[in-house]
Amino acid sequence: MGAGQATRLVEDASLAAPVRPSDRLRREGGDPHERSALAESLPTPGLDTPVARELAENARRRIRLTGQAFPKPAGGTRVLTVANQKGGVGKTTTTVNVAAALAQSGLRVLVIDLDPQGNASTALGIDHHAEVPSIYDVLVDGQPLDEVVQPCTTVEGLWCAPATIDLAGAEIELVSLVARESRLQRAVQAAATKGHEFDYILIDCPPSLGLLTVNAMVAATEVFIPIQCEYYALEGLSQLLKNIELVRAHLNPALHVSTILLTMYDGRTRLSAQVADEVREHFPEQVLRTTVPRSVRISEAPSFGETVMTYDASSSGALAYLEAASEMADRGAAGNV
């Protein structure tokens, strides 16, 4: 069998035959045995057709996860700060796509956009022009968090507290305010007492270690670090860990690094593998098994006001984020965080 024939065979099997059953699994949750049987029913191309084999394996992974209900965290709401002072490592992309994957799998998720650029708000299709009530009003004016939260129209169970350009001046305005480091923490706690409870709260931080990021770290109990699989990404990691230790020592004793996700992984380069191995060696318990590959679809999705989970659910990037979210949910349910 030639490579072209094998590729068409797997595409036909993954796109034509399983579509109807997988749609049913998505709607009804599906029986795990039925899900497994569907995955195993796909043909396996020969070793001489690596592209077709990859398509088949991706189709199996997708069928096993599609429509699966993720477990709720064991200890109540998990609040994670997605932080890394280096720009371009995939913080915002990771925040919105993991949040969408968790919400699609039956959990209630809130994204707090704490980056003045407002990219997380854009990716979730949330209006965030200057007149919109935003997280700035919560931090500086003390407005209740539940009054600025907006539902995401493309993913049920997902909400966002948007960022506006006003947030750019918040670093300066917060300096003179009382309890400047814990204003976000108080807002999150106040919202919970009003019945606005979520299974996951993900806080997207700016690429800096200023007062906005400190607020995020004080409000959270966990730090979620996306690391780009390139050398420069490792250089700033030690400084980030020092700052986390400072916040833990003086402001939030419960703060700890619970999750590390390797992003922009390129299996064709030795450097990506070396960076991944080094990170796994130093953080064996925190690093997720899943790595997020470089993907054009992931980059395209925000321009349509969507996450890759809704823009192209069949892409390799969407599958990677779905697997990462599944692993996070399993860890949370088991209390291994």
Image (cartoon, rainbow, N blue to C red):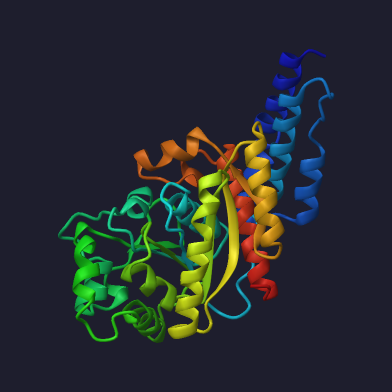
* Residue 283 vs residue 163, the one in the foreground: 283
Look at the image and tell me in which quarter the C terminus lies.
bottom right
Q: Residue at x 67, y 44 (%)?
A: 274
Q: Can residue 158 be seen from the camera position used here? A: yes
Left or right relative to 178: residue 234:
right
Q: Residue 219, image x and y in percent?
A: 42, 77
Q: How many marks?
A: 0
Q: Residue 173, image x and y in percent?
A: 19, 73
Look at the image and tell me in which quarter the N terminus lies.
top right
The quadrant holding residue 271 is: top right
Q: Residue 307, image x and y in percent?
A: 44, 47
The quadrant holding residue 102 is: bottom right
Q: Residue 207, image x and y in percent?
A: 38, 56
Work out which residue is located at the far left of the displayed protein and give it: 131
Q: Can residue 289 be seen from the camera position used here? A: no
Q: Residue at x 27, y 58 (%)?
A: 116
Q: Residue at x 56, y 41 (%)?
A: 317
* Residue 121 vs residue 226, the one in the foreground: 226
* Residue 80 vs residue 279, the one in the foreground: 279
Q: Residue at x 30, y 61 (%)?
A: 162
* Location of residue 2 with respect to 41 vertically, above or below: above
Left or right relative to 147: residue 2:
right
* Residue 212 vs residue 281, the one in the foreground: 281
